[in-house]
Amino acid sequence: MISFSSFPMREELTRAISDLGFETPTPIQQKVIPTLLTEPADIIGLAQTGTGKTAAYGLPLLHHTDLEAGYVQALVLSPTRELCMQIQEEMTKYGAHMDDLRITAVYGGVPIMGQIREVRARPQIIVATPGRLIDLLERKAISLEHVQYVVLDEADEMLNMGFREDIELILKSTPEREFTWLFSATMSNEVRGIAKRFMQEWKEYSVAAANVTNENIDHQYYVANHHNRFETLKRLLDFTPGIYGIIFTRTKQDCQEVSEKLMKMGYHVSPLHGDMDQKMRSKVMERFKAKSLQAIVATDVAARGIDVNDITHVINYELPDDPEVYTHRSGRTARAGKSGICMSIVSPKQISNIRQIEKLVRQKFHKSDIPDGADVVRKRIVFYMEQIATAQPVADFATLFQDTIHEQFVDMDKDDLIRRLIWLQLKDTIDSYQNSEDLNAGFERGRETGRGGRFARIFINIGEKDGLNPARLVQFITESTDMEANLIERVTVKELSSFFNVPSDAAPFLIEQLSQKKYKSRKIRLEETDAKGGGTYEGNRGGDDGGRFKPKPSARFSGDPKSYGSRDGGGSSYKPKKTRY
C-alpha cells in the first residue's frame, strides 16, 4: 500500500504530514504527487470535491519552493474567498516545519490595503481569487513576472462564474511560467479551451468517479408539490433532530429567504452566499464548525470553501440544473469514512431528473414519504428520551439541589414526571403538528375526488387563436407552475380566452405564478370569475384531444393554505387531509 512516507518529499513536509496523522494518500494524490515531485509537467487533474486536491498540488508546490527567494514563485487561483482561505490554511499546515515560508491569500470582501502590505512582505506563494488579484495587478502592488507554477483549482467553477477573461489576463501576466496544473471536477469545453491555449502537452489524471460512487451516502428523495417545498423542508428538519448539515438552494435570494424564515421559526441556521461580506461569512463558518448552528443554507458557489468532516445531512431544497453539481453537494457528507444522508425535495415532474442523477452516481435513490405529524412527534419524543437517558449531570448539581428536587416531586410518580418533562420540552412541536396536512404529492396518499369540493373558476386571456386546445392549455399551466394536471378541471377553450377550475385555495398561487409568464410573446392575464363562468368544453374544435376534454378526477390539493398566496402568507380556508395522533 502506498503511503505518504514513500513519496520523495523534503523532510520538513514528511514530518508535517506525520504530525497531521495522514498515512494513505487519496487516489488523486497517489496519481499526481509522484509525477509533480520528480518530473513536473503540465497536468489536468479531474476529481470531485473532497478528494484531497489541495494536498495533491500543495505538497509538490512546497517541495519545489525556494525559501531564500524574495519573489512570488507559485500562484494558486480559486473561485471563492472561502476556498482561498482554506487552501492557505491547509498549505500552511503542510509547511509548518519550513522556516521562512510565507504564503499569502488575497481575496475580495476585505480592505485591500492590508493585503497589499502582506504582498509586499515578499511571499513565495500567493493564493488568490481572480478578481482581487486583477485589482492588485492594476495597482502594480504585485508582480507575477517570476512565477514558475500556476495552479487553477476548481477551474470549471471559476469559468462558470465568468472569470475566463480574468484567468487569461493573469496567465498572460506570468511570462516565466513553466508549469500549469489545472484541477477540475469536469472537463467542459471551456476548461479544455483554457488548457489548449495556455498549456503545453499535458498529462491527464482522472478519478472523478471515486467520489460519486460513495456507498456510504444514502440518497433519498421526497416528492412534494412545488409550492410545498418550504413546508417539506421544515418537516424534514423537525423529523431529523440532531441534524448537522447543509441546505442547498439555487439562488442567493432563495438562500436568504429560506434561512430568514427558518430563523424566525426558531431553527439554528444561517445563510451563506456571495452577497455577504467576508466578516459575516467567516463568522457563520466559525459558528457552523463549533456546531452552534444545526445547518447552514448555502448556494453552490459559497459552499465550495466548506471543509467539515462531520456533516450528517445534505438537503437539496431544489435540484441543481447540472446533475454533476449534485455530486459536489452530496460529497459534503459521508467524509472520512463516515456515513451520511442526502435528501432531495422534488416535484413530480422532476422524477426524471432523479433518474439521470442515479445513472451518474451509479446508485439507486430511495423514495421516502414526507413524514406526517405523528411521525415527527414520535421521532422527537424518542430523541428527547435518549437525551435524558444519556445525560450525565455534574456531581455538584446532585449534591446541591438533591433535597430541593426531591421535595418538589416526592408525591409524583415516575411516569407522570416523565410525561410532564416531555410535554414541557415538546409542547410547541406537538401543538404545531396537531392537525398537520399530508405534503406528499401525487395519488399515493389522500386520494379523493375534487368534484363537489370548493373550486375557483379562472379566466385566462389566451385561447384558440393562440393555438390552444384543452390539453395544450393544461400542459402550459403545469409546465409553468408545477401544479398537477389532475387538479385542473372543466377546461373550456374559446376563441380569445379560456376558463378552467382549480381548488379555490390554489387559485392565488396559480394567478401569482402565471401572471409573470408569457405565451407566444403574449403577456398572460388571469382573474377569478364566478363558478358558472365559461361553461364546459363540448365540441371538437380541431384540437388534438379529439373532442370533449375529460381530466382525471382530482386528488385533494395537499398543500399548505398559507403558501398559495404571497411569500409571507395570505392563505385561505381550504382544509387538506389531516393527520392526528
Image (cartoon, helix red, strand yellow):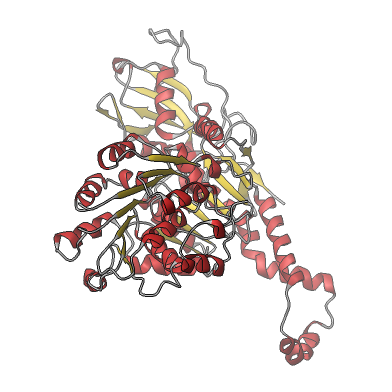
In front of the other: 555 or 390: 390
In which quarter of the view is residue 164 placed? top left
Q: Is residue 397 left or right of residue 222?
A: right
Q: Does residue 572 appear in this view?
A: no
Residue 111 drawn above or below residue 477: below
Residue 360 drawn above or below residue 235: above
Please provide percent x and percent y for residue 567.
40, 50
**Residue furthest out toward the left:** 139
Q: Is residue 504 left or right of residue 403?
A: left
In front of the other: 505 or 229: 229
Please provide percent x and percent y for residue 227.
47, 42
In which quarter of the view is residue 439 placed? top right
In which quarter of the view is residue 393 placed? bottom right
Please provide percent x and percent y for residue 383.
70, 62
Residue 22 drawn above or below residue 370: below
Q: Does residue 179 appear in this view?
A: yes
- Across the whole image, how many numbered discs are drawn on residues? 0
Q: Residue drawn 78% across and 73% down? A: 417
In front of the other: 314 or 202: 202
Please provide percent x and percent y for residue 242.
62, 61
Q: Is residue 519 left or right of residue 544?
A: left
